[in-house]
Image (spheres, rainbow, N blue to C red):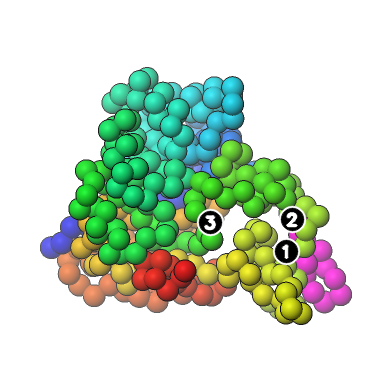
Amino acid sequence: MGARLELVCPAGNPAALRAAVDAGADVVYAGFADETNARNFPGLNFSRDEMAEGIAYARERRCCVYVAINTYPGAGNSAPWRRAVDDAAALGADAVILADIGLLDYSQRSHPDLRRHLSVQASASNAEAIRFYHQAFGVKRVVLPRVLTVSEIADLNARIEVETEVFAFGGMCVMAEGRCSLSSYVTGQSPNTDGVCSPASHVYYEKRNSDLVSRLGDFTLNVYSDGEAAGYPTLCKGRFVTNGRASYLFEEPTSLNVLTMLPELTAAGVSALKIEGRQRGRAYVARVVATFRRAVDAAARGDMVPAGELDAMTEGQRQTAGAYDKSWH
């Protein structure tokens, strides 16, 4: 038997939380319904009462809940973020996922026994940065940005004292996490401070003859021909015309999928796998979590890891191993 990777799964609402738990998640991560987490979309996330019920449901089934509070407070407006940390601690969260240095300091001083994880939004990708967060704020785990190869992750794990968590399945992002301002350029709102990339209030779809046009604010991001699958319009995955040809200049619609890389990630010293998808429905969550549950357990036993089961769930019907094998950038 090898080391068993912890399976950290998404929940954008109570139904998705129950689906993830029932499908075999070791941990569910979720956020409060406000700008304190990086998925602040209408209809998503949890009230305080829903979070309490979710934690109770998970705990009864030996599953943990991490609360993401991973956006950055604006100057002079830290109260909502501090309140989120206080409430997560009071509700019995197993860990809080933080990015802002001030909030990490507040959490350590106010709730020293509350486990702190460093969000990918902090963009910590080298041993010196991670040691700082560990020594200054007692961070126990860091969620690594999606820019490292497996060999780089192994080298990093040999040099730090904290656990590492890596992304396993879901959307790819062309920018270093925590530093993307593309959405803010178009809408005035960014994932880093408002918790939302491409806010729904700025998204428009319209028919143009037989084509479907997607827009973000005043910008046309894509034109889909009849029958072509339309994705959610984000600026980094817009299709733009250069030299008379329309193409995805920044990033093509594709999904990260590491199902076949679990033995390598385990050998590299990774502690946990994060599945993306807090904007997804419970059916998506249930299927992806169940598939990774079987794969993680198979890898721990030394058995063949099942592959190909999630091909139909990938964005644009395409998948990649991303930077893990240097094929992405």
Q: CA distance from mark 3 to mark 2?
A: 18 Å
Q: Quadrant of the N terminus?
A: bottom left
Whichever of labels 1 and 3 marks the residue nearer the N terminus, that label is: 3
Comparing 241 with 287, the one in front is 241
- Of residues 299 and 50, the one nearer the viewer is 299
| Numbered badge on residue 216 | 2
**Are circles 3 and 2 on residues that touch, CB within 8 Å?**
no
Does residue 44 appear anywhere in the picture? no
Residue type pointed to by label 1 = Leu
* Quarter location, residue 141: top left
Please state if 305 lies on the left or on the right of 240 as rendered.
left
Magenta region, residue range: 204-216
Q: Secondary structure at mark 2?
A: strand
- Residue 297 is left or right of residue 123, and the answer is left
Q: Is residue 208 magenta?
A: yes
- Mark 2 vs 1: CB contact within 8 A: yes
Q: Which mark is residue 175?
A: 3
**Residue 38 rendering spot, x and y as whole percentages:** 54, 43
Q: Residue at x 45, y 50 (%)?
A: 10
Q: Position of residue 86 (x, y in %)?
A: 43, 23
- Mark toward the start of the polypeptide (3 vs 2): 3
Q: Residue 146, image x and y in percent?
A: 42, 58
Label 3: which secondary element: loop
Q: Earlier in the sequence, mark 2 or mark 1?
A: 2
Residue annotated with mark 1 = 221
Crowdedness of circle 2 by 10 Å Cα count: few (<14), some, many (20+)? many
Decide: is 19 above or below 14: below
